Every structure is written in structure tokens, then in C-alpha cells.
Image (spheres, helix red, strand yellow):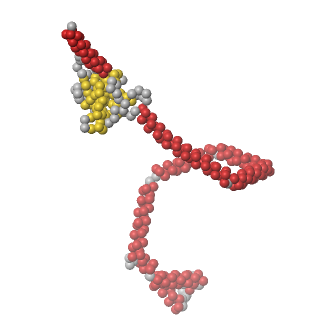
Amino acid sequence: MKIKKELLIGLVTIIGIGVLVVGSYFLKGQELWKSRYVYYTIFKNSEGLATGGPVNLNGLQVGIITDIKFQKNDLNNVIIEFELNEPDVKRLKGGTVILLNSDLLSGSYLDVLWGDSSFYFNSQDTIPSSVSLALEDQINQRLIPLEKKTNELISTADSAIKTIEAIFSRNTDNLDQSFNGINNAVKNFEIVSIELSGLIRSERENISKIINNIKLVTTNLQESNNVISEILNNVAQLSDSLIDSDIKGTIKNAKESLVEVNIILNEIQNSDGTLNRLINDSTIYQSMTNMINEAFRLLENIKTEPKRYVGFSIFGKKDKNILDSRDQKLLKKFATDSL
């Protein structure tokens, strides 16, 4: 009887241990008799991950988180162990493991990115990791600038309110004066508007004439539209002619002519020729002036007393001593100077 009790106790103990083992695997989501495909990834912070949490691929759960612990000899890193239990996903192809937080209420989970390379991770390998910004952090990032601007706006509004209070409390007299000034300005404006209305009424006839004149001008412009168009066409033709003409060639020829004239002037000024002496030598100028004066005197004498210079007779007699000795000397001198 004792043996039966001991066997029964042992059997119950074994069964209990088996149930515990199977239950622990069941609670972990693991299958006892199948091969396990376990991988590891490392994060600085587990960010709300928990054992038994989902591991997703393209939005579908393909595994579970089996363990979370500190890295050995390095408390700054957390090792996440996860197992793939999807039949079609046993080995990871390249890729990365991302820690995600779906919303403010649900916990964090792992999301596996399938790589494009031909490289596959084996079981027990460590997969590269990255952290996606949590929704709460995203909201905080957007709310922090908004909060800062709101605080600045509140501070500005508070300063404005304090300024207004100071104006009303300390400068009430000035404010009254300002209102009085505004009232006076409005009254002056009313006076000006009344005077302007009277001026318009008194000058209505002149204003009508001005408007009529403007109408006449516009009418004349309309009637002269054809003439204006012809003038514009002529101007356009003239501009086209100027464009088509060889202006550059003309300017070039003018420049060449000016260069030649400059050369001639330089030769006249710098050479020792007659023109240079005529321009620069005052003696020649004075001699020519005297010669011209003598010539004018001679011509005047010829006009007044032609018989002294031209003598003839119908009967063949010649007058003698037509010129006196003085006139002969002048005529000889003029001839000599002319030669």
C-alpha cells in the first residue's frame, strides 16, 4: 500500500511538472515539440515592450517577444529575445527590427522590415534595430512649439493689457486731450468738406467746361488716330531704314576721314612747308596784308583814273607820261611782291 502511494505521488509530481512546463510554453506562445527560430535585437530602452508582446511583419503577427533583459556587463543596452512562429516565416531576410508604439493606450511592439538582399539571418542571430518615434513623442514634438508660441502670445497679451491699464490709470488727462483733439479734427474736416462742396457748386460751370475740353481732346485723338498711326508707321520705317543702313560703315569712314584730316593738320603744324610758315610766321602774314592793301589802292586808282594806266588814241597817237614816277614804283613793287 505504501508503494502504491509513493508511485501515485511520484506520478502526480511528474504530471504536475509536465503540466507546468507545457503551460509555461503555452503561456509564452511557444510550441513544445517544434523547432524554435529565436532571434535577438538590442535597444537602449525597451519603451514599454513586454514578454509575450507581438512581433509583426507587414502588419501581421509572425512571432512573440520571449524575453527582455539587460545586456551582460552593459546596463545601457536591453536585449530583446523574440521567436518567429509563423510557418512561412522562419528565417529573416536581411532587414531591421523596429520598436513601435501604436497609440497612447496600447503597448509597444516589434515590427520586422523584410530586406531586399539575398542574405538570411539564422536562428540565434542578432538583428539590427531602430526606434520609431512614438505617437506620444510625435504629439509632444508638435505641441512643444505650439506651447512655446502660446506662452509668447500670452506674455505679449499680458504686456499689452498692462500697457493699456497704465495708460488709463496714469494718463487719463492725456487721453481726454487726445479725444478732444480727435473731436476738433473731425469738426475741421466737416468745415473743409462744407467749403469744398461750396467751391464745387460755384465752379460747376468751369468743371463742366474742363470735362467738355477733355472730351474734345479725346475726340480729336480718336479722329487723328489714322494720322498718328501713319506717323508711327513712318517712325517704324525710319527705324527699320536706320537698322538696315550701313551706319557702322559710315561711322568707320567718318573716323578714317577725321584721322586723315588730323594727319594733314599735324603735317601742316609740324612740317616746315609753306602752309606752316603762312600760319605760324607773322612776317608773311603782314607782307600779304600789305600786298592786299596796295592791290586795293591800285584798283581804286585804276577805277578813278583809268587813263593813267590804259592809253590809246583813234588816230594812233599815244599819250606819254601816263604814270608818274611814284605810281610806276608802286606798280613795280606790287608786281614784284605778287611774283
- How far across and how far down the image is residue 97, in percent? 31, 30
Q: Which quadrant is home to the N terminus?
A: top left
Q: Nearer the viewer, residue 35 or 227?
A: 35
Residue at (68%, 44%) from the top-left corner?
219
| Residue 267 sits in quarter | bottom left
Asked whether 15 or 65 is in front, the reply is 15
Q: Residue furthest left?
A: 3
The answer to which of 49 and 251 lies nearer the viewer is: 49
In the image, taking residue 133 as reference, residue 234 lies left or right, namely: right
Q: Which residue is painted at 49% across and 52% down in the image?
A: 242
Q: How many marks?
A: 0
Q: Where residue 229 sits: x, y (%)?
A: 59, 45
Residue occupying image coordinates x 66% and y 54%: 170
Locate residue 145, reporting x and y percent: 47, 41
Q: Nearer the viewer, residue 87 or 231?
A: 87
Specify whether residue 60 is in view. Answer: yes
Q: Relative to 84, does residue 71 appear above or below in the rendering?
A: below
Is residue 115 at least partly visible in the picture? no
Relative height, residue 31 to residue 259 (above, below): above
Q: Percent x, y for residue 120?
A: 23, 27
Q: Quadrant of the C terminus?
A: bottom left
Residue that sits furthest to the bottom in the current view: 325
The relative height of residue 81 versus residue 276 in the rendered view (above or below) is above
Give the residue furthest to the front: 2
Q: Residue furthest top?
A: 1
Q: Is residue 196 left or right of residue 240?
A: right
Q: Quadrant of residue 72?
A: top left
